[in-house]
Each structure stands twice: as C-alpha cells, then as structure tokens.
Amino acid sequence: MKSTRHEKKMRCGEQTRSLLSKVVGIAVLLAGFLLAARLCAGAAVNPSQVPSIFKPESTPADSIFHLSLLVLSITGLIFVIVFGLIAYSVVKYRRRAGDDGREPPQVYGSNQVELAWTVIPVLIVLVLFLATARVIQSVQDAPQPPGAIEVIAIGHQFWWEFRYPSLGVVTANELHVPVSDPSHPTPTFITLLSADTDHSFWIPRLAGKTDLIPNRVNHIWIEPHDTGLYLGQCAQYCGTQHAKMLLRVYVNSQEQFDQWVQEEKKPAAIDSAAEEGRRIFETTACMNCHAVSGTAANGRFGPDLTHLMSRDTIASGAAPNTREYLESWIQDPDSIKPGSLMPAMKLNDRDLNAVTAYLLTLR
Amino acid sequence: MASETIALNEFGDRGRSISERLHDWVITVDHKRLGILYILFSLVFLVIGGIEATIMRIQLIVPHNHFVSPQVFNRMFTMHGTTMIFFVAMPILFGFGTYLIPLMIGARDMAFPRLNALSFWLTAFGGLLLYFSFIGGNGLYGAGNAPDVGWFAYAPLTSRAFSPGHSTDFWTLALLVSGIGSMGTAVNFIATILCMRCPGMTLGKMPLLAWMNLVVGGMVILVVSPLTAAQIMLLLDRYLGGHFFDTQAGGSAVLWMHFFWIFGHPEVYVLIIPCFAFASEIIPVFSRKPIFGYPVMVAATIAIGFVSMSVWAHHMFTVGMSSYGNTFFTITTMIVGIPTGIKIFNWIGTMWGGKIQFKAPMLFCIAFLFQFLIAGLTGIMLSAAPFNWQLSASYFVVAHFHYVIVGGILFTIFGAFYYWFPKMSGRMYNETLAKWHFWLFVIGFHLTFDFMHIPGILGMPRRIYTYEPGRGWEIWNLIVTVGVFFQIAAVLVFVVNLLLSLWKGEPAGNDPWDAWTLEWSTTSPPPDYNFAAIPVVGSRRPLWDLKHPEDPDWKYE
Amino acid sequence: MSSSAIARSSIESEWTLPSRGRVGMFTLIAAESAIFTIFVVAYIFYIGKSVSGPMPKGVLELPIFITVCLLSSSLTIHLAVRALRSAKVGAFGLWWFVTMTLGAIFLAGTGREWHRFIFEDGLTISTNLFGTTYYSLVGLHAFHVTVGLMAIALVLILTLLGKVKPEHSERLDVFSMYWHFVDVVWVVVFTVVYVIGR
C-alpha cells in the first residue's frame, strides 16, 4: 500500500495496459476456439429435430414463448443498465497513477437513492408478475373442448405407456396425435400417471413439462399447429436409464391419424410362418411382461408389442427398430440400454431367430 | 493497542513435536483453529467434488460416449452435488464465520467453544460417512456403491423398492450427522453475536459480516430441521416399514419434495448470504469508502431471510400444483429478488466515487458483481412459472445455479481467501499468481457456464449420462467441457500459491490492507486470546476512527 | 484523551448483553420446534388418507391423566427452581423429584397406550399411514421427554450428593425452558392427534 508516486504511476498504467491486453487476448482465444469447435463438432444437425423451446409449434408452447420474450426483454434491459453501471464505476473510479493517497469522500448512503432503486424493481416485478399470472391461468386452466383427443400416459422405468381409452388403442413410447385446426380444434389432453417412480413428460416444442408422479394424477395438453415429428425425453431423474427414456410425438394430419388409429385397434396380425416364434414367446418369460392383443400374452410390466413394427424405434428411442437391433435387445438389453429392467433372455440362436421373426410380423 | 499484544502463535512455539502439534489441532476448541480446520476440510472436498464434475463432463463431451457407465455417472452427479453443498460450501462458510466473528466483534472466542469443536467434527464425520459409501455401500448393483439418487433424493426413488442396499442410507445418515453439526454452529453464531460483542458495539455498529452471519444462523436453525425431520421419516420408511413417502400405501412423493425444498431453497440463501458479507467487507476497503447504505443492507438481508422461506415450491412448478399455488410461488420468488437487487446497487454505490484498487480480493468481488447479476436475472426468468415449465430440470437450471454457486459463492470465497489469508497465516500471498488464478478461472467459468444455458434452451434435460446426436447439443457440450480444464488449471495455481505463500510469503503485518474492522487491530496471526485488552468501539469502523481522529465515523452515524 | 477514557469506562460498565445460556436454549428450542412442525404437518396431511387398517377413531382414547401429569410437571419444575433461587435446597430436591415422577408417569402411560395398540389393535408403525404418523410424532415427543428425564435424573443424583447449590439456579432455569417446551409440544400433539385427528 505504501509506495512511491513513480511506482504507483507505473503500476496503474501497467494495470490498464495489462487489463486491456488480457481482454483482447481472451477475445481472440475465444473466437479461435469457437471456430475450431464448430469445425470439430461434426454431425450435421437437422433444424427440425432440434427440440428448442424457442421454436414452439403448439398453443401452450406459444404462450410460454411469448411470455419468455417479455421476460427476456425486461431482464435484458436490467442487465444492460446494471452491467453498464458496474463497468462504469470500475473504470471511472479506479485509483489512477499519480494518486495522492488521500481517502475519497466518505459517503455513507442516501435515502432518496435507496428509495428509487427499491420502487423501480417493485414496479418491474408487478408488471412481470401480472403477465406471468395470466399465462399460468391460460395454460393450466384451459378447458377441454369436445373435439379433444384423450390419452393416458403412464410412466415406467424406462418407457412410456400410452392408452387412448375412447379409441381403444394401447401403444408405447411413440405418441401419435392429430394436428389441430383452429376452426375445429383437436388438441390432445394427456392424463399423466406413474407406475413406479417420478418421471416428466417434456416435448419442448409442444408444451412445458409436467411430471408423472405415482399416486397422483396430473394433466398436460398440447395443440400442435404443424405436422411432423417432435422429440423430447423424460425430464425427471427416474433411475439408471433415465437418459434413454426418449419421447417421439408424431403429429399427423387428421386422415393419417385416423388411419393409424384404425391399424392400432386391430388385434395382432397372425402369420403362420412365425408360429414357432410365437410359441417360444408365449412359453418363455416374454408374456409375463409383454402383451400382444388377440393372443395369450397379457403382461403389463413392459410395452405392448401388438403393433411393434409400426414404431420407428425400440427401447423407448434407444435404438432403431431393425432386425439387428431387435436381436441385440432380446439377447442382451444391457448392450443397448445398460440398467434397463428387461432381463437378458438367454435364448439360443435358433430360438432368438424365431422370436425375432415373430416380432417382425407384429405390424 | 496492537503493539501491546504479544504474538504467541504456532510459529512461535518451537520445541513441540509434530505429533504434539497435531494433537493440539485435534483437541482444539479455539475458534481460529476450528475455522482453519473447516476451511482445509472444505478445500479437500472441493478437489474431490471437482474430480466428480470432471468425470461427468468428460462423459458428456460427445454424445453416446463410453467414458463411464450410467451407474457410475448417476453416482457422480449425486455425490458431486451432495459434496459441494454440504461438505464444501457450508463448511467453508462456517469456517470463515467461526474464524472471523469473534475477532470482528472484539470477543476472545465463540459462546460455546466445545460445541464449536463438536460441530466441526460432526461435519467431518458426515463427509467421511458419505465417502465411505464407495467402499461400504451396497446399492442396486452389488458391493461398493455411493448413492445415486440425486442430491435431493426424490421419493419414491429412495424407497427400498427402488434403492435396495445401503447407498441411500449413507446419503441420509451423512447429512443427518453433518446437519446436527450445522445446527450447533448456528447456535454458536447466534449466541456469540448476541451475547459477546465488545462494549460500545451495539447491533447497529457491528460489521455487516456479523449481521449476515446472524441471519444465516437463524435460517440454519429453522431450515436444516425440516431436512432432518424428512430424513428421519425416510429412515423410518426404509427400516421400520413406515409409509411417509410410500406411494403404494397412500403416501405422497410430493410431500418429500415440499419438505426437502423447504430446506433446500433457504439453504441456497444460507450459502450466498455469508458471501454477501465477504463482498460487503472487501468492496469498501478496496474502494476506500464505507459500505453504502449500511441500514438498508441489514434490512435487505433480514428481508431476504424471511421471504426466502416462502419461495420453496418454485422448485416444484412442474409437479402439478394448482394455478393458485404456482401463482403464489411466482410472486414470492420475484419479490425475493428485490432486496437482493438492492444489495447489488449498494455495492455499486460503495465503489462509486471511490479509488478502486485491483488487488486479488477486489478482482474476485468485481467478477462476483457481474456474475451474480446474471445469475439473479436467470433466476427471475425461472421464477415465471410457465417459462419454468420449459426450463426446469434442464441444463438451463444447471447453468443458473452454478452461476450462483460458482460465479457468486466460489468467487467471493476466493476473494475472502486472499483478503484474510494474511491475517490467518501472517504471510502475504503472491499477487501475480493470484491474478493468474483469477483470469484462468474467469475464462474457464464463462466457457463452461455461459454456454451451458444453451443446451437447456434446446431441450437437454439434466442428470443424463449421455444424449442423442442430431439435437444440436454437441457443440455446446464440447465447449462446456473445455472450460473445465481452465478451471482445473486455475485451482492448481491457487493451491500452489497457498502452499508457496505459507512457506515463504512476505510477513503481512497486522493490517496489510489499511482496513477498518477489529480483526486488523491484532497481530497476524492473532494470539490465542485474540486481543490484549477487549476493545471499546464507538462506530462501525473502529480502526478508521483511530486512524482519522479528526474525522471519525461516529460523528456521522 | 481522558474524556474518551471516561466515556470508555462508562460504556464498559453499562454494557450488558443477554446470557449465552438462555440465547443458546432459545435457538435449540426454535430448531426443535421446526422439526416438530414438520412431523405435525405430515400428521395433518395424512389424516383420513390411510388405505386400510385401524383408524384413529377406533383406537384412540383421550390420555387425560398423563396429560395432567406432564403439564403439572411444568409447575413443579418452576417451583423447584424458585425454591433453589431462595436457597431452599431441600424444597428444591422435593419438587425436582416430583417433576421426575410426573414425567415418568407420562412415559409409562404412553408405553401402556402403545402396548395396547400393538398387541390388541394390531397398530404398528408399518400398518398404515395413521400408524406411521402417530408413532413417529408421539414417539419423537416421548424421545424428547426421555432425554429431559435423563437430565433431570442426573441433577437429582447430584442433589442427593449435595453438589447442587443456589448459584446453579440460573442454569437450572435455562434447563427448565427445555422442559416447558416439551410440555408445550405435548399440548400441540394432543390437540392434533387426539382432538382434531380423531
């Protein structure tokens, strides 16, 4: 603290120069690094597959997006002002070279200033709160119109069960809903239940998330404006394979949706060529957990397999639905989803082939 | 006054063997030694928690990585969170408080020195218990398992059905034990501050650090207890067949969430308020002005203490509370931002018109101001329930709370380290190394936690050991991981600086910063009895009054 | 400088702060109140939610006698401390002994009630939500009574050994705050469990 005027002058000038050089250095480093990272990051990204909350395609997600714009504007403004004040005071009131060492005026406070910077935040909070309260109500307390599709979603460790009670459809992991036409709205209202522990249903482009909690009934609704595939996944840690409890929501046109429902309602296709596989399926442990409608298999612990081949993925999105992956999954689920609750079936090659062939007929 | 004190510190007592000196440290009830023990303990766990974070970030650097298994990853995030909150942040802040409070209020020790020692050893034992789980636990997959249920351990994942074995029990018992230690510390803080201030130091004249630790003490008393209660209930469920959180028998998973967050939210204020105290001591000294608006700072802290106990369910916006519930917690959360923001303005007001010196403690506090501002603003974003329905349980939240904890809390802790290291050790640290530490850490912190907000906005949930390619998350995860290595380098520089300075730093003298509170009136390090004579004070800055008898503070307060 | 010395000594002589023991005990009571509050909240939350098993109405009987005993022990402990403050060590010992007896009667009564629940009504902590919340809340309180009784017994032994003096009355007054707290908690538990919850 005690040093000659010359040393102080040198130090302060030095400090400013070194500060500047550091800032420039960091900026250059950052820019170079970001460029390198972009080049290395590889995989091309299909923008429609990016589940961004800022690309809403459904009414609740839209409401949230609009609210977020207001929130971001207000917080952005606050940031610019306060950041500016901090930066200004740090630069303007730094000790200069040639400082005489006297203490600056000792100011203890100011009631007017305190009042001002209390009242203004209160007003900001009021505005934000009122805007927010409106959206809470409009999303949570939205009435269910007569044309709504009703789905019951049951969360399991580590897959999703979907039931359409009034349509007689039971499926898993991939949800099909019709696109909603504003003149005749057909939103989908989903009741959320859990068979075991906590989960959360999150498709960012369609709605905010809502949890699935055992012994509790929750609700969520979506009203998609555009057809397409929307991605999401479980958003509440539910155990080892929480990361691969993925969600795919297919928003179909009304005709496509009706067609899908018609197919899903049918019992399982019977293919005599797959008789051997079906026999193995029904005599080993498979039918304890899985159901295939129209057959003796009526297990509820695992996904319904009646129309397995109508799905694009297996293991709740963890692998594509192809012959190889099906075989790997049946033989050893841990190779795809280590820690999933399906046991390795330990079938010999012949049985494995037969069962896979059988599953491949379940369109 | 200072010249009268005779230094009888550990550097002076030659002739004691290593084992005798170790024994002194183990049986000590001296608040200064216990404070240092807390701080050293926390530094060790900081490194361990950092290793756990590094493991996670390496696993997440690319999608579908195989660096660790999902089981190991899930244990990593559980242990990382639990360690950092309970065995790094809380102990280090309690350590600074334990060291500084008696010195700053002119007392010779805490109100209950033996309770002080018990509190430290309970906390230490809790940490050991938690880490013993790696070798002693018996989780879902066989022997040797740390808990993997997340640091807030939601029910029913923690029930016997979903977490067989003992890993969850290690989590529960470690926190129960260290929670009792925390409560002991809180009792000590409150009793010391209320009952042992030196003559003349009315509540309105004590340093802000004392006020803030008083509020923290009160909060710990009221909020660690709900966690203790919830953990007793969990143990009853797991071992005596209780049904508190047993959803099969009508129990409620949401009840655990309420109980946990009634603890969990005020807990983060328990962590940040001592850091506000550090900033409120450091910024004035390095701006050469008193703190702007002392009474408002006190009132704002008390307001934060109270209001923070009414906001907890903003961690539960997605569990399906009614719109009334969600609206209530939105408004309370927004309200708690107001006194917090006022404090930022007061710190700016302190710097305004001053003569700022950019020594390491001040650098860290300036960075804290910028970063805490951003953290508070992302908090406001999260307080709007509908926005929260998108952002919660995503990497946006992870970025937000790390911004507070690392950008706010850890930065001020580093500032406090550099500020009080001369007092505690008698030696000055190396300013160049400190600046390297600062800049490396700033770069690493911003690389990691600025860019971490983006995957959250793009739909990436938290607590996932891997993620799908093609969702636009890859590059951000890569950048986030790179930042970790800068932070590791920074912490290495910090540790080297600490050790080098302890070994051959310049002698610091009583008052290297030309500061104004009572701890600077005694030697560095202080003697066992702190002060030769108990001081009598007339204002908030007793040493300013001594150094400026023509213009003392008590004329203006 | 001499005027500041005078000012200094007058500040020093007039400087009084609250007693550490009392403040410490207040904070302990605050912490314990928070723990009890959570158990009471859980109890109230689960009223009527048991899926099966014995219900409160079917098994709970108002424990009037033991309640009177416990609440009277607050009076007797107060009389004991007052006697000690007036240097009446003998009277102190007597009232202290009565306090301990009343507390022990309370515990015995609770034990009897639990015996009846377990062996006649089939109600244990794992039976249903009522069992879980009842045993945990009443049990937590009984645990606090037990700890208090152990402290009281210790002091009784020290009294019989002649070690308790009138200057200890302040410390015992601080301890009695804990005992009063235990009684207040019982009033709350009694109301919630035996009045509201039935």
Image: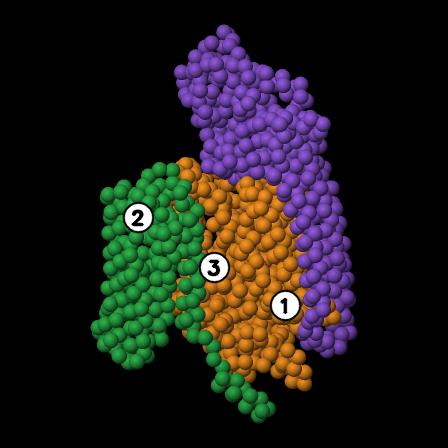
The percent coordinates of residue B545 (x first, y second) are 63, 81
The 10 Å Cα crowd at callout 1, few under 14, some 14 to 19, many 20 or more, is some
Separation of marks 1 and 3 at Cα, in angstroms: 24 Å
Q: Which residue is mark 3?
A: B222
B428 vs A153, nearest the viewer: A153
What amino acid type should be assigned to the residue bearing mark 3? Answer: Leu
Assign a secondary structure to mark 1.
helix
- Circles 2 and 3 on the same chain: no
Residue drawn where x is 72% and y is 51% of the image: A74
Q: Colour of chain B?
A: orange
* Residue B450 seen in the current view: no
Assign a secondary structure to mark 3.
helix
Q: Colour of chain A?
A: purple
The percent coordinates of residue A355 (x first, y second) are 48, 15
> Across the whole image, how many numbered discs are drawn on residues?
3
Q: Which residue is mark 1?
A: B296
Above or below, A55 relative to B521: above
Residue drawn where x is 46% and y is 56% of the image: B224
Assign a secondary structure to mark 2.
loop
The 10 Å Cα crowd at callout 3, few under 14, some 14 to 19, many 20 or more, is many
Chain identifier matching the green colour in the rendered picture: C
Q: Which residue is mark 2?
A: C60
Nearer to us of marks 2 and 1 is 2
The disc, 1 or 3, on the residue closer to the chain's N-terminal end is 3
